[in-house]
Amino acid sequence: MIAFKTDVHRCLAASIGAVAVLSAAGCGGKEEAAPEVARHGWGDAAPVVVVERTSGGARFTDEVEPNDEPGQAADLVPPAGIEGTFGTPGDADLFKVAVDRAGGLRAVLDAVPGVDTVVQILDAKGEVVVHGDNGGANVAEGLPNAPVEPGTYYVKVVEFVKKKPKAGDAEAAGKAARAPAPYRLTVTYAEPPGIGEEREPNGNPEDALPLAPGGSVEGYIGWRRDNDWWSVDPASMLSLEALDIDIASPKQVKLTVRVLDAKGNTVLVREARGRGQDLAVRGWKASGLHRILLSGRYSSHDRRYAISTRKRALEGDDEVEPNDAAGTANPLAVETGALDGKRSAHATVGDQDWFALPVGSASVGYNIDVSPSPGLDVDAAVVRADGTAIRESANAASGATEKLLSVPVGAGERLYLRVTPRPRGASAAADAVYTVRWSTTAYTTAPPPAPPAP
Ligand SMILES: [Ca+2]
Ligand SMILES: [Ca+2]
Ligand SMILES: [Ca+2]
Ligand SMILES: [Ca+2]
């Protein structure tokens, strides 16, 4: 039987089996290129006639069912495209790729109206190598640079359905039914990475690619649980220099960045509060090799993140990161024995700063002011090493100074000033700063003065 059809996307017929599909004029084809008719034998299936169209160097062919299992998958030679159809809800379509080089495979499934889709790359055994699921219905899915070696792989596109109706359950099948949904899939080899671009696989610390202090790199959070490792060796930095790190986020991804020391201990974490939020670390200073692990919720096949770093000469009272816990606290007093002083610090997304109050041989009181830049809202507290607060100040107004007055510190007692940016407004800005001013006063355990009436 020969079925004559033009554009499967407009003149869709559900009868694409092991039958022929031939292009003809008259139904508003979306590809203007003159179709070329070829005869293909796909696996053990009967030979079929397919219409070949081209777009951007990729040749498009029509999907042929059944193709839900690796053994049924039609061959696909990149660069190539498929025009297919999600037939029954939860339909899976597999295409077999004989990869001829080590590098990256790129697969992009255009947005399908009303259908939530997933794209995967499977290895020769049918195991999932990477899983792309960035969003719900009407969202393009893709994998920018799935790591491959020469050999057999499968590209799998599937409609995500919460619960596939059981075979024979006519009622459930009726509820889940929808019109056949055409789709367009493109599979190409990714461009080889240039200098400063990630090279997959880089999902393990030993695969970390170098990020030179003062340099920049780019990469994709390209699929679910894509972890990208970078290594930073601060050996080339001067003793008074620290690194400012900016991470520009793709708008689809909710990023997390971790800095780990050579032993694999996490020394610093910054987590975006939503998709597309940029991250920053200010004044990072370390000795020895460290690694940066970038990961994210959701992914992007078409937009890269960028990590850029800049060396900065520290002033004497500048904060040094990491200082997000008691164990890494900066000293509150820059000069030993001082009775008052000042510190300057940055408050970036997900940041917390700890400053250790001097341990004295006599009991003393502390007055501490924390003054944020306009638009920044911080909370300040004097706390023990375990985080329990001795005194807190949480003025809700942005840019308002937090005051901690006559905080008693006993002889030999170790306490900390903890500054936490509030998760709102300009607290997120990479250049939000605050100043800490402190002085000593008489030791008293009397309750602090009552706050002014609102
Ligand atoms: Ca199928
Ligand atoms: Ca990646
Ligand atoms: Ca800070
Ligand atoms: Ca900090």
Image (spheres, rainbow, N blue to C red):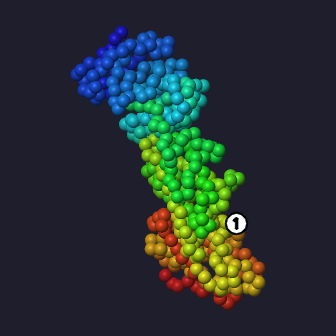
The type of residue carrying mark 1 is: Gly
Task: Say if 260 sits above or below 120 in the image.
Answer: below
Based on the displayed image, in which of its 4 quarters is residue 332 positioned?
bottom right
Residue drawn at (69%, 75%), measured in percent from left and top? 415
* Mark 1 burial class by Cα count in 10 Å: few <14, some 14-19, many 20+: few
Which residue sits furthest bottom? 442
Nearest the eye: 399 or 32: 32
Residue drawn at (50%, 53%), measured in percent from left and top? 216
- Spot occupied by residue 343 in the image (x, y as percentages of width and height): 58, 76
* Horizontal side of residue 284 vs 58, given as left or right: right
Q: Name the residue under label 1.
A: 327
Secondary structure at badge 1 equals helix
* Horizontal side of residue 56 vs 439, given as left or right: left
Nearest the eye: 368 or 217: 217
- Spot occupied by residue 89 in the image (x, y as percentages of width and height): 45, 29
Residue drawn at (58%, 49%), measured in percent from left and top? 210
- Spot occupied by residue 32 in the image (x, y as percentages of width and height): 26, 27
- Spot occupied by residue 165 in the image (x, y as percentages of width and height): 50, 29
